[in-house]
Image (tube, rainbow, N blue to C red):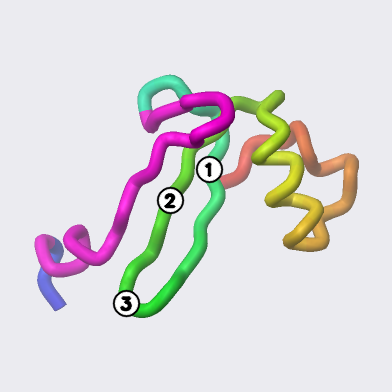
């Protein structure tokens, strides 16, 4: 699979809550549905990011650590 084909399968989404983008966000969450991988950017204080961590079963002390 070529790089351009792989890039076409990735959707980058600005968070609807904090409006973070790849340029302004600090952390990102990933989700896969069908043939696409979605990357959503968040600020560290974004409640949507906190909710994503809770749903993923992450411990509360990991909420303000950057995701790599």
On the rendered structure, is 3 left or right of 38? left
Q: Which residue is mark 1?
A: 28
Residue name at image x 41 percent, y 35 percent: 14
Local packing at callout 1 (Cα closer than 10 Å; few below 14, some 14-19, many 20+) is many
Examine the rendered structure and indicate whether residue 42 appears above or below residue 28.
Answer: above
**Gap in angstroms between the C-alphas marked 3 and 1:** 19 Å
Residue name at image x 13 percent, y 68 percent: 5
Can residue 20 be found in the magenta stretch?
A: yes
| Earlier sequence position, callout 3 versus callout 1 | 1
65 or 53, nearer to the observer: 53
From this viewpoint, which residue is outermost toward the front? 16
The secondary structure type at the circle numbered 2 is: strand
Q: Which residue is mark 2?
A: 39
Q: Based on the displayed image, in which of its 4 quarters is residue 13 positioned?
A: top left
Q: Which residue is mark 3?
A: 35
Label ID, residue 58? none
Q: Position of residue 45 (x, y in %)?
A: 70, 24
Asked if the residue at tag 2 contacts the one at tag 1, i.e. Cβ–Cβ closer than 8 Å, the answer is yes
Residue name at image x 29 percent, y 59 percent: 10
User: What range of the chain is rendered magenta?
Assistant: 4-22
The secondary structure type at the circle numbered 3 is: loop
Residue name at image x 47 percent, y 45 percent: 40
Q: Position of residue 60 (x, y in %)?
A: 89, 44
Q: Based on the displayed image, in which of its 4 quarters is residue 47 positioned?
A: top right
Q: Position of residue 64 (x, y in %)?
A: 76, 32
| Earlier sequence position, callout 1 versus callout 2 | 1
Q: Based on the displayed image, in which of its 4 quarters is residue 21 positioned?
A: top left
């Amino acid at each position: 699979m070529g790089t351009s084909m792989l890039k076409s399968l990735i959707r980058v989404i600005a968070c609807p809550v904090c409006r973070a983008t790849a340029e302004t966000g600090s952390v990102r969450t990933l989700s896969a549905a069908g043939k696409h991988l979605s990357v959503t950017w968040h600020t560290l204080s974004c409640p949507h990011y906190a909710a994503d961590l809770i749903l993923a079963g992450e411990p509360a002390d990991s909420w303000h650590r950057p995701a790599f």
